[in-house]
Structure formats: C-alpha cells, structure tokens
C-alpha cells in the first residue's frame, strides 16, 4: 500500500469512529429525554424493555467500534512498514506521550471511552430502575 492509501483509510476509519461515538451520544440523549418525559411514570416492564433496547444499541456500537479499531491498528502497522515517509509523520497513533503514563493514544482513547460510557450506562441504569422522581417532577 502507498502512503496516501494508508492515510486515506486511516482518516476514513477515524471519521467512522467519531460518527459512531456521535450517534451513541445521540441515543443516550434521546433516552434521557424519554426517561424524563415518559419512562419515569412507565411500568417496570416498559422501563426494562427501553433499557434493554438501549443496551443492545450501545453494545452494537461498541462491537462496531472495536472492529474498526482493529482496522485502525492495521493502518498503523502498515504505516510503520513504510520506513521514510514524505509527510514526515513517524507513526499513526502509536505514540506514547509522557502524560498518558505509558499508554498509546489508541489505548488511552479506548480506556477513556470505556470509562465514560460505563459511567453513563450505570447512571442511566440507576435513574431507570432505582431513582424515585419527586412528585412535582411527575
């Protein structure tokens, strides 16, 4: 593969991952609105169904992102085999800045995404099944 082909594929994969994260946040936002407007008064089976649908959608997005990450790492490996490049870019995401405590940019991004979506998921679980909404909010 040529340098331009590798960069093109790399940027397309990065754009897809950003799109998936954006859609995931859109789904979460829609769920929050639905929770506030409708689900807080809904019977348990309906809340369970809504949460299971959200869970399946987020799991699908996570698996899709993981698959794209494998391809993204493949572009980094292909780039490293080129040797000297005309762009002067030494590597694609495999740098390990001191601020990341030995993690690569990819590893840090994946860890941050996992922590953020995990915290949001736990919070939505709590608000869906355990939080008692004030009467005036109903």
Image: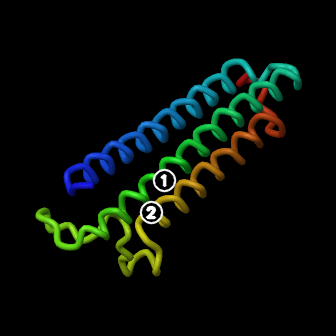
Q: Residues within 10 Å of mark 2 (few under 14, many from 20)?
A: some
- Residue 29: x and y, percent? 56, 31
Q: Residue at x 16, y 67 (%)?
A: 85
The extreme right residue here reads: 44
Q: Classify 135 as above or below 5.
A: above
Q: Which corner quadrant of the image does residue 3 belong to?
A: bottom left
Mark 2 element type: helix
Residue 67 x %, y %? 54, 48
How much space separates mark 1 and mark 2, taking CA atoms?
Answer: 8 Å
Q: Is residue 47 left or right of residue 77?
A: right
Which residue is identified by label 1? 69
Q: Is residue 5 left or right of residue 76?
A: left
Residue 12 occupies quadrant: top left
Scheme by which the image is coloured: rainbow
For the residues labelled 1 and 2, say whether their Cβ atoms are less than 8 Å apart. Answer: yes
| Quarter of the rendering occupied by the C terminus | top right
- The outermost residue toward the left is 86
Give the residue displayed 75% in from the left and 22% down from the top: 39
In the rendered image, the vertical position of residue 107 relative to residue 52, given as above or below: below
- The total of numbered circles placed on residues is 2
Residue at 72%, 48% in the rendered image: 122
Q: Secondary structure at mark 1?
A: helix
Camera-nearest label, 1 or 2 = 1
Q: Residue at x 43, y 60 (%)?
A: 73
Residue 61, given in percent of the width and then of the height, sits at 58, 39
Q: Nearer the viewer, residue 134 or 22?
A: 22
Q: In this orientation, which residue lies closer to the viewer: 40 or 21?
A: 21
* Nearer to us in this view, 84 or 63: 84
Q: Which residue is mark 2?
A: 106
Q: Quadrant of residue 83?
A: bottom left
* Residue 134 place in picture, x, y as percent: 77, 30
């Amino acid at each position: 593969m040529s340098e331009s082909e590798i960069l093109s594929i790399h940027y397309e994969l990065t754009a897809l991952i950003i799109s998936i994260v954006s859609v995931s946040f859109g789904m979460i936002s829609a769920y929050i609105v639905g929770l506030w407007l409708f689900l807080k008064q809904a019977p348990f089976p309906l809340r369970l169904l809504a949460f299971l649908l959200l869970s399946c959608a987020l799991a699908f997005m996570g698996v899709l992102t993981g698959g794209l990450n494998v391809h993204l790492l493949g572009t980094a490996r292909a780039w490293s085999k080129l040797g000297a490049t005309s762009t002067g870019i030494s590597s694609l995401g495999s740098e390990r800045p001191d601020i990341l405590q030995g993690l690569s940019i990819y590893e840090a991004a994946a860890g941050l995404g996992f922590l953020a979506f995990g915290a949001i998921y736990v919070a939505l679980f709590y608000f869906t099944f355990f939080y008692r909404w004030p009467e005036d909010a109903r």
